Image (cartoon, coloured by chain):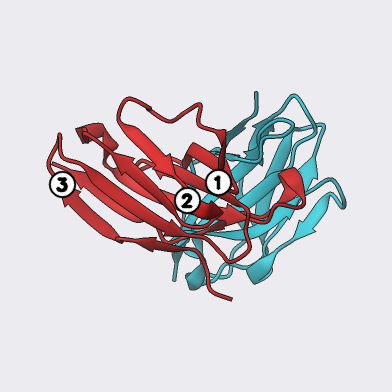
Amino acid sequence: AQSVTQLGSHVSVSEGALVLLRCNYSSSVPPYLFWYVQYPNQGLQLLLKYTSAATLVKGINGFEAEFKKSETSFHLTKPSAHMSDAAEYFCAVTMGTGRRALTFGSGTRLQVQP
Amino acid sequence: EAGVAQSPRYKIIEKRQSVAFWCNPISGHATLYWYQQILGQGPKLLIQFQNNGVVDDSQLPKDRFSAERLKGVDSTLKIQPAKLEDSAVYLCASSPLAGGRSDTQYFGPGTRLTVL
């Protein structure tokens, strides 16, 4: 079975600082991994996804993530935080063969301090 | 291109009442999902449709929850009777048929249900 663990339910950074949101996965098959962002009272929006091509994936709004099989990780980073990045971030993995539903982590709330 | 539409956006009911949510996916998307997001948690799949057939409803509490997708387009999720623990945001998502596990799922804004 697939699962996702997000370390740190809350992360606070200063504007302009590095953003690092951690995600570790467990999967019995090669995983497909996703990062979604959720702004207050809105649905989830895809930031980026890993689909077994390049291990370094670039997404929208300056975010990127690196797939590391040896560490079973898919951490999300952004070199310089902006106030508008404040939101909830979810890491997700697709289920096993034939099932496309996402299994989500519990989320990390990012606060950006001025 | 229009996104996934959901209604209502908010609903407050008392326990043991019934409630229904509606979802209109992105045009042409064959796969439709309903997720339940309890406060402080990630979304959890309730049911997955492909066209108008059910692919996965293993986590749907079938004694009180039901869902249908008529003509492979719009979908309705119903709860009857509601319990306090059903308070959550109900998210609808859709994705194209092609691509399999790498398909991007597009989410609607959700319906926030409060059961008193």
| Quarter location, residue A103 | top right
Type of the residue with mark 1: Asn
Q: Position of residue B19 (x, y in %)?
A: 24, 46
Q: Residue furthest bottom?
A: B1
Chain B: drawing colour: red
Nearest to N terminus: mark 1 or mark 3? 3
Type of the residue with mark 2: Leu
Identified at 37% across, 45% down, the residue is: B77
Quarter of the picture holding the C terminus of chain A: bottom left
Residue assigned mark 3: B13
**In 3D space, how far apart are the residues under numbered discs 3 and 2 (Cα atoms)?**
26 Å
Q: Residue furthest right?
A: A53
Tell me the cyan chain. A
Specify few, some or many for label 3: CA neighbours under 10 Å numbering under 14, 14-19, or 20 or more. Answer: some
Q: Position of residue A32 (x, y in %)?
A: 74, 42
Q: Position of residue B82 (x, y in %)?
A: 22, 36
| Quarter location, residue A92 | top right
Type of the residue with mark 3: Ile
Residue assigned mark 1: B52
**In 3D space, how far apart are the residues under numbered discs 1 and 2 (Cα atoms)?**
6 Å
The residue mark sitting in front, 3 or 2, is: 2
Please say whether residue A56 is visible from this viewpoint.
Answer: yes
Nearest to N terminus: mark 1 or mark 2? 1
Q: Are marks 3 and 2 in contact (CB under 8 Å)?
A: no
Identified at 33% across, 55% down, the residue is: B111
Nearest to N terminus: mark 3 or mark 2? 3
Specify few, some or many for label 2: CA neighbours under 10 Å numbering under 14, 14-19, or 20 or more. Answer: few
- Name the secondary structure under disc 1: loop
Q: Position of residue B69 (x, y in %)?
A: 48, 48
Residue assigned mark 2: B70
Of residue A90 and residue B2, the one placed in the foreground of this image is B2
Specify few, some or many for label 1: CA neighbours under 10 Å numbering under 14, 14-19, or 20 or more. Answer: some
